[in-house]
Amino acid sequence: MDILGDMNRLELMVSVCLLLGLESQAFSANRPNIIFIMADDLGYGDAGCYGGETIATPNIDRLAKDGLRFTQAYSGGPVCTPARAVLMTGKHNGHAPARDNVPHYHTYLKHADVTIAELLKERGYRCGGIGKWSLGDADTEGRATKQGFDMWFGYLNQDHAHYYYPEYLDDDEGRLELPGNGVNRKSYAHDLMVERALRFVRESKEGPFFLYAAFALPHFSARDEDPHGFTVPSTEPYSDRDWDPRSKKYAAMVHMLDRDVGRIVDLVNELGLAEKTLIVFTSDNGGHKTIHKRFNTSGPLSGYKRELTEGGIRVPFIVRWPGQTRAGGVSQEVVAFQDMLPTFGALAGAQSHNVDGLDVGDALKGGKIGEPRRFLYWDYGHCRGKQYSQAVRMDDWKGIRSVRSGNRMELYDLSKDVGETRDLAARYPGVVKKIEAIMDEAVVPDPRYQVGTVYKGRAIWKKGL
């Protein structure tokens, strides 16, 4: 019996186990908590740190001061549902399972779709979501708790999110009933969701956790809920302004959003989680065209929500991760919603497959994106007949093919013309040809999202433009 040899082998095994254990602990400690806060219809120019001068946003501005502010960040789409589908799946608008807001009954994720929450959950994250989901109703396989979320509180249905005093809110697999709330207005949905978000952070402080806070503010309300288009408990601190009621309510909504971004950040700091937590703040798409001009919601950009000009798809995007992200910095790196799944996955030690996004982790820390990007792609207007539009960003070139130009390509150099005022298509036919080829190849046909029109409430499909 080789006792000495057996002892050496035993010591080696113990050493390996200890090393593996230490490596595992180190890996666990390096996986950051991730908080992704997304406003609904907040324009690129609304917040002070993006040039806004009318509405005070001290907490969002502080987040930018303590973190990194991106000037070339893009949503996944110009409206709610496709933006969320691109974010959750890492696939751009031509591949994502939900490509438009209508028809709503088709905008559901399937079991085969892989979401950020599912990817992180496999790596030991507790995943919680609050706010506006839009990707699957309660009776579908697309509901949030069937797509990787351990907790969901808020609105599953797209239309339900238009009510700020709803009769119920979706609560995990059930409901929080709020009988009579539409009349007595005792419970403002946003306040309830913020409290649930804070509770989730407290309960998950041992980490790692992923919080997706998809707030509905400052999206307009359902028409039968408020005649002025926005529903808010108070117009403070703008009640005494010589403004129309709609403007006061919009400003108050942005104020509430800013206040509660601050509450979440303050809680992270209070719990000693600042250096362990990556916080992202953004908006799902551009601001609405009916917002009063005094707010300059699109800032220097052209267009609004529902358009593929920069004002419809370029969004505020702020990242804070003390010790990792360059505080007070400004990044001109081009990042997009489809990048979040592969980026968050990489931070958690998971590999992502079959996605269109890139791992932009270095950019989130203030560096450069390591992998060259071929293009960014968007489209909009399925089942809206001649409203169907496509857009591509290739390097600094932006091409738009839409009804406003008779389906002729418009071409802009964003490095010199962020407002998209000078159409250069006639001067650069070679660039136009390349972008047209990208538009043709970027779309994988989906019978739910063919180009068509609507007649008496029924979708009548047509092929092509």
Image: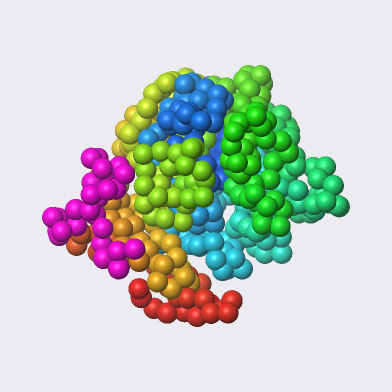
Residue 420 magenta: yes
Where 197 falls versus 433 (above or below)?
above
The residue located at (63%, 35%) in the rendering is: 252
The percent position of residue 83, horizontal first and vertical second, equals: 50, 52
Q: Main secondary structure of the magenta part?
A: loop
Q: Nearer the viewer, residue 182 or 354?
A: 182
> Picture quarter containing residue 211?
top right
The residue located at (33%, 36%) in the rendering is: 333
Q: How many marks?
A: 0
The residue located at (48%, 50%) in the rendering is: 289
Tell me, yes or no, if residue 129 can be seen here. no
Residue farthest toward the front in the current orientation of the protein: 242
Q: Nearer the viewer, residue 283 or 90?
A: 283
Quarter containing the N terminus: top right
Q: Nearer the viewer, residue 214 or 258?
A: 258
The percent position of residue 156, horizontal first and vertical second, equals: 67, 55
Where 463 falls versus 406 (above or below)?
below
Tell me, yes or no, if residue 135 can be seen here. yes
Where 33 falls versus 181 (above or below)?
above
* Highlighted magenta segment, given as a residue range: 404-430
Residue 456 magenta: no
Question: Relative to residue 460, is residue 307 drawn left or right?
Answer: left
The percent position of residue 432, horizontal first and vertical second, equals: 20, 59
The residue located at (47%, 21%) in the rendering is: 65
> Picture quarter containing residue 404?
bottom left
